[in-house]
Amino acid sequence: MISFKNALAALLTVLVTVDAKPKCKTFADNVVCSAGKSDYKLVKGLVSDNNRTTGITLRACRISGIDFESFNDLSSLTYLDLSQNKIQQLKLGVIDEPKELTHLNLSYNQLVDFPLGFFDQLTKLEVLDLEGNKLNNLELGILDTLTKLNHVDLSSNAIVGKDFSPYVFDQSPHIKFLDFSRNNMEDSPDNLLHAFESLETLNLDRCFLTEVPVFATKPNLRTMKQLILSTNQISALDNAAIFVNLDSLELLDLTANVIENINDNVFSSLITLLKVDLKNNKIKTIPDSLFRNMPKLITIDLYGNQIEEVPVNAFRGSPLKNLNLSNNKITYLPDNFCLELRNSGGKIKKFLMDPNPWQCACLNDLLKELKKFGIEYNSGKYDGSRPVCVTTNEFNCKRQKSFNEMYIDMFNEVKTAHFRNARAA
Ligand SMILES: *[C@@H]1O[C@H](CO)[C@@H](O)[C@H](O)[C@H]1NC(C)=O
Ligand SMILES: *[C@@H]1O[C@H](CO)[C@@H](O)[C@H](O)[C@H]1NC(C)=O
Ligand SMILES: *[C@@H]1O[C@H](CO)[C@@H](O)[C@H](O)[C@H]1NC(C)=O
C-alpha cells in the first residue's frame, strides 16, 4: 500500500519534472523550445523520434546535461541549437544519431573538452559554434571526420595558442570562417593554420598579440578577405613583407592596438584592400607612400591617433571615399588638400576631421573646400557648444610643423577652460 506521504512525494517529483521540462512547439518541421522553471537534463522523448524534424532550437532552455538517445531517430535533422545552456560535459555518443546534421551550435555552455570521437558520426557538419565555453584546447583528431566544415567559432574560450596543435584542422581544409577571438593566441606555432585552403575570415580580436602573427599571414592564406587583429598590443608594422601573401584581403582591422611605427610599404601588396582600420593606435606620422596606389582602397580610419602631419602623397592613386582623421593632433592640412586628393584618383565623399586642435584659419580653408566639393563632414559639431579651433591675432594658416606645438597647447588650454566653465555653470 502506498502511504499518503509517498504518494505526495511522487506527485511532487512529477510536478517538478514537468515544470523543469522545456516547452516545445513545432512550426514547419522546426522544433523551438523555451525553458521550464528549473534546470533540466535532456532525455529521449522531448525532441527525439520524429524523422521529419529538420531543426531543433533548445536555446537558453536551462539544459544541464544530455542523456543518451535524446536525439534518437531524427534522420532529417540538419540544424541543432543548444546554445546558452549549462552543459558542462557531453558523453561520447549523445549526438551521434542525427547524421544529416550540418549546423551545431553549442555556444555559451560550460564545456571544458569533448571525448575523442565525439563528432565522428557528424560527417556532414558545416557549422560548429563553440563560442563562450571553457575549452582550453581541441584534442588532435577531434575534427578528423569533419571534412565539410566551413565555419568554426572558438571565440571566448580558454584556448592557449601555443599549446594548440596545427594538425587539428588537417582534415577540414575548407573552413572559410575561423574565430579565435578572446583567447590567448600569443606564441602560437607559425604553422597553426597550415591546413587551410580557402580561409576567408580570421578573427583574432583580443588575443594578447604583440605583433602581427606569422601564422595569420602564410602563403596558403591568400584566399583571406578579412583579417581582424583589433584590441591587441601590436606596436609596430615594421616588416614590409608581413602582408605580402594576402592577395585577396579586403578588410584589415588593426583597431585599438599600440601601433606607432609603420613601414612605408607594409600595405603595398594589398591590391584588393577596401578598408583599413587603424583607429585608436599611437600613430604619429603617416609615411609618405603608405596608402599610395592601392586600387580598391576606399576607407581609411585613423581616428584617435597622434597624427600631426598629413602628407597628401600618402593617398595618391587610391580611390579613397571615406577618410577619418578625427581625434588627432592636426592643426593644418596641406593647401588644397581635397583638390589634390581628387586630382590624384581620390573620390572623397566623407571626411571626418573633428575634433583636432585646428588653427581657425586652416579649418576655414578646409571647410571651404569641403563645401565646394560637397564632401560630407562632421558639421553637427560646429554649433558653438565647444571649441573647435584656436587662433592668434594673425588669422592666416601656418603650414609649418614648428608652429604645431603652440597651437596644440593653446587648444588644450581653451578646451580645459571650456570644460571647467561648463562644469561650473
Ligand atoms: C519515418 O518514421 C515513420 C514512422 O515512425 C516510418 O514509417 C518511416 O519509414 C520513417 N522514414 C524514414 C525515412 O526513416
Ligand atoms: C549560436 O547561437 C547564438 C545565440 O545563442 C547566436 O548568437 C549565434 O549566432 C549562433 N551561431 C551560429 C553560427 O548561428
Ligand atoms: C571614421 O569615419 C568613417 C567614415 O568616414 C566612419 O565610418 C567611422 O565610423 C569613423 N570612425 C569613428 C571611430 O568614429
Image: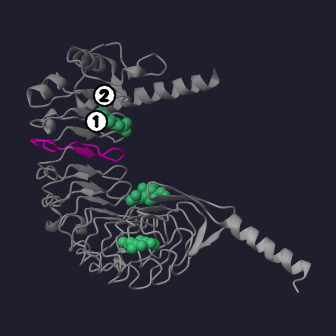
In terms of image quadrants, where is residue 321?
A: top left
Element on which disc 1 rests? loop
Task: Indicate whether 162 appears above or below 177.
Answer: below
Which amino acid type corresponds to the residue marked 1 in the rendered image?
A: Glu
Which badge, 1 or 2, is on the more N-terminal residue? 1
Cβ at disc 2 under 8 Å from ligand 3: no
Q: Which residue is mark 1?
A: 308
Q: Assess disc 2: are there few (<14), some (14-19) or many (≥20) residues with their C-alpha within 10 Å of its C-alpha.
A: many
In terms of image quadrants, where is residue 202?
A: bottom left
Q: Assess disc 1: are there few (<14), some (14-19) or many (≥20) residues with their C-alpha within 10 Å of its C-alpha.
A: many
Q: Is residue 279 magenta?
A: yes
Q: Residue at x 30, y 76 (%)?
A: 123
Tell me where the magenta segment starts and ends, as one range. 275-296
Badge 1 vs badge 2, beta-carbon distance below 8 Å: yes
In terms of image quadrants, where is residue 150?
A: bottom left
Which amino acid type corresponds to the residue marked 2 in the rendered image?
A: Thr
Quarter of the figure that contains the C terminus: top right
Q: Is residue 394 left or right of residue 409?
A: left
* Percent of width and height locating residue 242: 17, 61
Task: Indicate whether 103 appears above or below 72.
Answer: above
Quarter of the figure that contains the N terminus: bottom right
Element on which disc 2 rests? loop
Residue 74 in view: no
* Percent of width and height locating residue 5: 90, 78
Principal secondary structure, stretch drawn in magenta: loop
Q: Is residue 396 magenta?
A: no
Q: Which residue is mark 2?
A: 331
Q: Is residue 135 left or right of residue 406?
A: right
Report ligand 3 position as a quadrant: top left
* Percent of width and height locating residue 44: 55, 76
